[in-house]
Image (spheres, rainbow, N blue to C red):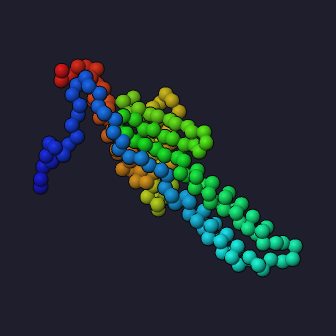
C-alpha cells in the first residue's frame, strides 16, 4: 500500500491570503429528459416522409411541412434550448446556478456560510444514475440542482468544500498559523 505524497494533496493557502477560486465542475441536468424529444423528431420525420405527396384532397404538402416544422420547433428545439440554458458550476468558494435563455437568472451559495445537502432520487433517476440535490443554508431560498449526474459524488464534493471553506474561514478569523 502506498502513501500519498505531499505533492498529491492540494496545498492550503497561507493564513491571511485568499485562495484562488478554481472551477471544480460544471454540470447540466441529465440529457435523458430529452429522449422524448428525440423520439418525437424521429416520428415527425417518418410521418412527414410517409405522407409527403400522399395527402387527401383538401390538404397540401406545404401544410404538412408547416405542421412538421411547428412540432419540431415546439417539441424538440425549445426543450433542447431550455436544457442547454441551465448550468450549475461548483467552484472552490461557491455554487453558481444559472438558467434562462433571454433573461438570465443567477443564484449563488457560498461554501463558507455553510449549508445542508439533501439528496432525492426517484426510480427513474436511480435508473439513470442521477439525483436531485437540495442545498439549504436556512436563511435564503433553497437551491435545487435537478437531475445531477452522480448525485452522491457531487453531494460528497459539496460537503467537503463546505468543510474546507469553514476551516479556512475559522483559521483566518482566529489568526491561526500566523
Q: Is residue 4 left or right of residue 108?
A: left
Say which of 171 and 50 sits in front.
50
Say which of 101 and 178 sits in front.
101
State which quadrant residue 60 falls in: bottom right
Give how far across and how far down residue 16 sits, in percent: 25, 23
Say which of 164 and 137 sits in front.
164
Say which of 52 and 158 sits in front.
52
Q: Is residue 103 left or right of residue 19?
A: right
Q: Residue at x 25, y 19 (%)?
A: 174
Residue 97 against residue 58 in the figure, above or below = above
Q: Residue furthest right?
A: 58
Give how far across and how far down residue 104 sits, in percent: 57, 39
Q: Does residue 73 appear anywhere in the picture?
A: yes
Give how far across and how far down residue 146 sits, in percent: 50, 48
Q: Residue at x 33, y 39 (%)?
A: 22
Q: Is residue 8 left or right of residue 92?
A: left
> How many labels sit on residues?
0
Q: Residue at x 36, y 30 (%)?
A: 112
Q: Residue at x 41, y 32 (%)?
A: 110
Give how far across and how far down residue 28 sits, in percent: 47, 50
Residue 83 against residue 110 in the figure, above or below = below
Of the 4 image quadrants, the one containing the N terminus is bottom left
Amino acid at each position: 500500500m502506498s502513501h500519498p505524497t505531499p505533492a498529491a494533496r492540494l496545498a492550503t493557502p497561507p493564513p491571511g491570503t485568499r485562495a484562488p477560486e478554481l472551477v471544480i465542475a460544471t454540470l447540466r441536468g441529465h440529457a435523458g429528459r430529452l429522449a422524448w424529444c428525440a423520439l418525437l423528431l424521429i416520428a415527425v420525420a417518418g410521418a412527414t416522409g410517409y405522407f409527403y405527396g400522399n395527402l387527401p384532397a383538401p390538404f397540401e404538402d406545404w401544410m404538412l411541412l408547416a405542421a412538421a416544422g411547428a412540432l419540431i420547433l415546439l417539441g424538440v428545439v425549445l426543450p433542447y434550448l431550455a436544457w442547454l440554458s441551465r448550468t450549475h458550476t461548483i467552484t472552490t468558494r461557491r455554487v453558481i446556478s444559472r438558467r434562462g435563455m433571454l433573461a438570465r437568472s443567477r443564484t449563488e451559495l457560498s461554501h463558507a456560510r455553510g449549508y445542508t445537502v439533501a439528496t432525492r432520487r426517484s426510480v427513474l433517476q436511480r435508473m439513470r444514475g442521477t439525483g436531485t440535490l437540495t442545498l439549504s443554508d436556512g436563511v435564503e431560498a433553497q437551491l435545487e440542482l435537478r437531475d445531477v449526474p452522480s448525485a452522491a459524488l457531487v453531494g460528497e464534493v459539496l460537503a467537503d468544500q463546505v468543510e474546507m471553506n469553514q476551516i479556512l474561514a475559522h483559521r483566518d478569523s482566529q489568526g491561526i498559523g500566523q
